[in-house]
Amino acid sequence: MRNSDTQSVAQTLSAWSTLGKVPHGSSIRQVIERFLNATTPETRRAVLARESSLLRLQDLYRELAILRPDPGERSRELAALLVMANEDILAAIRGNGKTEALLLLQSCFEFGKGAHHAKHEAARLCLLELWALHAGGPNMKYALYPNGILFSGGGKTHEEMARKFISEGHGGGPPQAGGLMTRTGPLAFAYDLSSTAFRANGVQPSHIGAAFKRWLRNTGADETKVSFNYAPESGGR
């Protein structure tokens, strides 16, 4: 892409009031700028995938052969954005194009009118950590919050996870339960309720597997192909 084209993208984005309202410190403007300056479809997709936890998850589901034939409206939006011409997007930002392009960009990058509640990101990142597990390898700590919100710790203790959940803006209050999750096969997992920080008051073991399956479904997977089995008290904090 020519330098003049790159400058045009930057200038257009700097004048877009909706993007200007994104909180300071967010990388979203730089990511969108890289997306619109991408010179190949592969680079464009890679930029979007780095920003979109949903796209990364659905790519994994495709590899695992558990992606539903119709993964949902957000999946169709991601596909539509990837084939939309940059000229159409920039024209819409300048005010002389169809507003559908703006709504699509906001929906796929999840800001402005397309912003999702932070609980979606918490659960998606938990699922990405889940699929990074290896059968016979280390386990991961997870927590279940009210309304079935899932969170994982990346090696942190359950107490540290709870503080991180709040500091990253996913919600407030303590988890309802927590424990360890282990991958036992390509599409099979075992879990316990072993957290000593958060006792599972009123949470049945089946609620954990059901929450994971619900978020798999929500993110486009065929959850019936994945199993979650309760294996009590392997011990964890």
Image (cartoon, grey):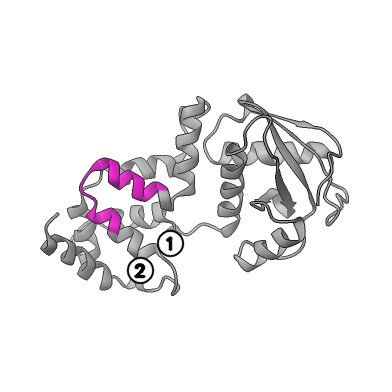
Q: Residue 111 bears which disc, if any?
A: 1
| Residue 75 horizontal side relative to residue 192, left or right | left
Place of residue 40 in the rendered image (x, y in percent of width and height, measured from the top left): 22, 44
| Magenta-drawn segment | 34-49
Q: Residue at x 66, y 61 (%)?
A: 165
In this rendered view, identify the residue nearer to me: 228 or 70.
228
Q: Residue 19 bears which disc, if any?
A: 2
Place of residue 177 in the rendered image (x, y in percent of width and height, measured from the top left): 80, 50
Q: Element type at marker 1?
A: loop
Q: Residues within 10 Å of mark 1 (few under 14, many from 20)?
A: some
| Residue 184 horizontal side relative to residue 82, left or right | right
Q: Quadrant of residue 192?
A: top right
- Magenta segment: does it hold 181? no
Which image quadrant: the N terminus?
A: bottom left
In this rendered view, identify the residue nearer to me: 111 or 62.
62
- Magenta segment: does it hold 47? yes
Q: Look at the numbered discs 2 and 1 and tell me whether their residues touch, using CB distance below 8 Å.
A: yes
| Residue 63 horizontal side relative to residue 158, left or right | left
Which circle's residue, 2 or 1, is located before the other in the chain? 2
Q: Could you tell me if residue 108 is visible in this image?
A: yes
Q: Alpha-carbon distance for marks 2 and 1?
A: 8 Å
Q: Amino acid at mark 2?
A: Leu
